[in-house]
Amino acid sequence: MFNTDTITHFETLETPFYYYDMGVLRATLQTCHAASSKYGFHVHYAMKANFNPKVLDAVQAVGFGADCVSGNEVKAAVEHGFGNKNIVFAGVGKSNKEINYALDADIFCFNVESVQELEIINDLAKAKNKTAGVAIRINPNVDAHTHHFITTGLDENKFGINTWQLDEVVTTLRNCANLQFLGIHFHIGSQITDMEVYRSLCIRINEIQEWFEDHNFTVKVLNAGGGLGVDYYNPDGAIADFEGYFKVFKDFLNIKPGQEVHFELGRALVAQSSALISRVLYVKNGQRKNFLVLDAGMTELIRPMLYQAYHVIENLSQNSATHNSQLTTHNYDIVGPICESTDCFRKDVEFPQSYRGDLIAIRTAGAYGEVMASGYNLRDRVGSVYSE
């Protein structure tokens, strides 16, 4: 991702900024497209992972649809050329304004997360003399074995409809003339790397689709969500295992003639394509602790503070000036400038001896980096730099 010319260019730029390697992004998208199209699967890009305009354009160009969780994401998908019949709209708290916008845009499907939401969408569609396509988001109670903050498919999570509510769901669907039942939707969590989790999900999907068929509802769409993880410890390593991921669903889903299988991938498509580039502002040497204070903080990348997430951190200035084997190292807490003790990227990490002005790269920041940035402490919103 970083050659000598790139680092020399970085030296001329104001930091912090997000750096996008568009070659890595396109290679990842093309690998996913090849793996999914082999089985005729439909992929919707989960826009919440990164809605940088150039990223959206690259995703749209490869032919993926869009998975949205707000009205503004639906609007961005439309504006970036994602066909309205390739847009799905999830979210546990859709407002009337957002639903009305999506109805006017004639999107493919609302992924519905409560019985009351079914009734609201039906009423709003009736007022417009429209029929809304809906899929029922169901909690399969499958443990994703990931961080509890990003687990979404258990009975106690706020998302989706629990299986014990399905009788009420079908009764409501029968009473809602302005809804078209398309299928069932699942999403069990994020940053999942254990393929056995997806095998367990397939078993539950098979059971639940049979339940709907037994109640005389034809399931046209099986939407398995997303959640495929990436290797944060090896940012220059292999692209996410799309082949293995899609093969699990091909092997273990009971796909019936004419059924469509949909996925909503985000992190796995964009995470490895970007890094947060920062500079050392201050080096503070103490008796028990040494600190590197960067000009980027939790306002630019909150994942380490919010999820205790790991990111590889590199000193580009020292790595480019000296062979790694010759570097003097110290242990540092690598922290940001924000007035919060939690504003720390890594604690007690062995790191090349660093100096004021050194360029620092925090890797694998393409997912949930730029999109979660804030103006806390009245910080400036930072810009993006692209390899092309």
Image: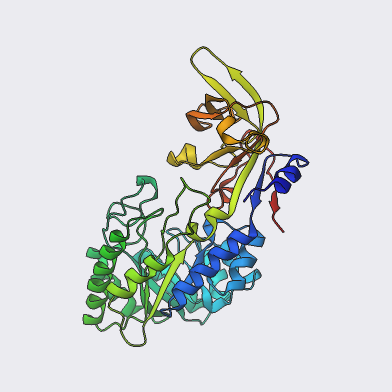
For the residue pair 281 and 375, the one nearer the viewer reads as 281
Locate residue 345, reporting x and y percent. Answer: 52, 34
Residue 95, above or below 316? below
Examine the image and state in which quarter residue 277 appears: top right
Q: Which of 147 and 176 is in front in this view?
A: 147
Q: Residue at x 57, y 65 (%)?
A: 27
What count of labels does the image hold? Answer: 0
| Residue 57 seen in the figure | yes
Residue that extends furthest to the bottom in the rendered view of this protein:
257
Q: Position of residue 382 (x, y in %)?
A: 68, 44
Tell whether 195 sits left or right of 294: left
Q: Which residue lies furthest to the top in this view?
A: 287
Residue in the image at 58% along x and 55% along y: 273
Q: In which quarter of the image is residue 122?
A: bottom left
In the picture, which quadrant includes the C terminus? bottom right
Please tell me whether residue 354 is drawn above or below residue 252 in the rendered image: above
Colour option used: rainbow
Q: Is residue 378 left or right of residue 63?
A: right
Q: Which residue is drawn at 55% across and 14% down?
A: 286
Rendering coords of residue 130 (x, y %): 50, 81
Vertical relation: 190 (above or below) 174: above
Spot occupied by residue 71 in the image (x, y as percentages of width and height): 56, 63
* Residue plotted at (26% across, 58% down): 141
Q: Depth check: give the residue in front, 187 or 330.
A: 330
Q: In this view, does 246 lie to the left or right of 238?
A: left
| Viewer can see residue 106 | no
